[in-house]
Amino acid sequence: MKYLMCVLVAAVLFGCAGRGGQGEAAPPLEGTSWELRAILPARGAGEAMRPADPRLYTVFFGADGHAALRVDCNRATGTWTATPDGGLQFGMLASTRALCPPQSEGERVLRDLARVRSYGIRDGVLVMPLPQDGEIYEWTPAQP
């Protein structure tokens, strides 16, 4: 029952988060860069994780389907695909393996991005819900 509730909450939040009306195309991600603003927990499951320096967690969506990421003290690359209806999936992500500080969320971010299946953009915020546990990743446009 708890799993079902989390999935329902994520679906409702995602439905409000981004694509507008039914049948409307999701905004394209090609050529955009984003900084992690927060990882929102499943409803009632604790506090949001907000990185002290959002520039340490970034994702760039290349027009060629290539993704480039910074995850704390490491870099990662891989592929991504999106569909007009808001589907999003990352391929295998290869990363450097530098030893980051103990409070780093780098491994978590890489693990979670592999589970992303959809996205939306609302008020300039990129939203990626995790369908399995109801967490939601929020990204803001990267500063030049």
Image: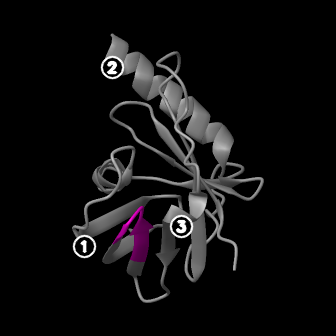
Query: Of all residues shown, which one is farthest toward the top?
Result: 1
**Residue 48 rendering spot, x and y as whole percentages:** 55, 32
Q: Please state the total of marks drawn on the protein image.
A: 3
Q: Which kind of residue does numbered mark 3 sit on?
A: Pro
Image point (57%, 83%), residue name: 31
Quarter of the rendering containing residue 143? bottom right
**Residue 6 rendering spot, x and y as whole percentages:** 42, 23
| Extent of the magenta region | 68-74
Image point (52%, 15%), residue name: 44
The disc placed on residue 46 is: none
Answer yes or no: do the residues labelled 1 and 2 have beta carbons within 8 Å?
A: no
N-terminal of the pair, mark 1 or mark 3, is 3
Image point (52%, 25%), residue name: 9
Residue closest to the eye, 56 or 18: 56
Residue under circle 2?
3
Relative to residue 60, is residue 126 depicted above or below? above
The disc placed on residue 84 is: 3
Label 2: how many residues lie within 10 Å, few (<14), some (14-19) or many (20+)? Answer: few
* SS under mark 3: loop
Residue closest to the eye, 26 or 43: 43
Relative to residue 51, is residue 68 depicted above or below? below
Could you tell me how far apart the alpha carbons at marks 2 and 3 are, in whole angstroms?
28 Å
Image point (39%, 72%), residue name: 81
